Amino acid sequence: MTSEQKTTTLWWPTGPRELELVRELGRRAWPPRLPEQPIFYPVLDEDYAVRIARDWNVRHDGAGFVTRFEVDTEFLSRYPVRQAGGRTILELWVPAEDLDEFNRHIAAVIEVVHEFR
């Protein structure tokens, strides 16, 4: 990826197990989806990611984390933005079989920006 390429900021709420896998991948990629997870759906709104991490991941995993990462905007144009509820509840739906290619378009390390316990 060159410095002239534009990127889009995405967020992903996650639990401790997935976050450990991200760390094992050098914070440069998302691990493969589980069979019951046919879609990777990063969100376009930080507040939405916070709500998921705080209200769902903490209850189910004991901790929730919000990650932030940049992806090549041109590459993302193949995935339509989907509204999953209210006006700011926006997601990209990336089929699990596209995740390796998606990971190659992540522009920098995946950062943890919020943590809830």
Image (cartoon, rainbow, N blue to C red):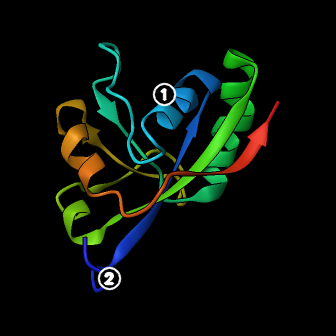
From the viewer's side, name the closer residue of 25 and 93: 25
State the quadrant of the C terminus: top right
Is residue 100 found left or right of 115 in the rendered image? left
Which residue shows up at 76% across the image and 41% down it? 115
In which image quadrant can residue 54 be found?
top right
Q: Residues within 10 Å of mark 1 (few under 14, many from 20)?
A: some
Q: What element carries label 2?
A: loop
Q: Is mark 1 on a helix, strand or loop?
A: helix
From the viewer's side, name the closer residue of 52 and 109: 109
Q: Position of residue 71 (x, y in %)?
A: 35, 62
From the viewer's side, name the closer residue of 50 and 30: 30
Image disc number at residue 3: 2
Q: Which amino acid does label 2 sit on?
A: Ser
Is residue 86 found left or right of 47 in the rendered image? left
> Mark 1 highlights which residue?
21
State the quadrant of the N terminus: bottom left
Q: Position of residue 58 (x, y in %)?
A: 74, 25
Q: Where is residue 55 in the image (x, y as percent from the top left)?
A: 73, 32
Which residue shows up at 61% across the image and 50% down it? 48
In which image quadrant can residue 14 be found?
top right
Image disc number at residue 4: none
Is residue 78 found left or right of 2 in the rendered image? left
Rounded to the nearest angstrom, the CA distance separating label 2 from label 1 is: 28 Å
Is residue 34 found left or right of 20 in the rendered image? left
Which residue shows up at 48% across the image and 45% down it? 27
Q: Which amino acid does label 1 sit on?
A: Leu
Could you tell which of marks 2 and 1 lies nearer the N-terminus? 2
In which image quadrant can residue 35 be found?
top left
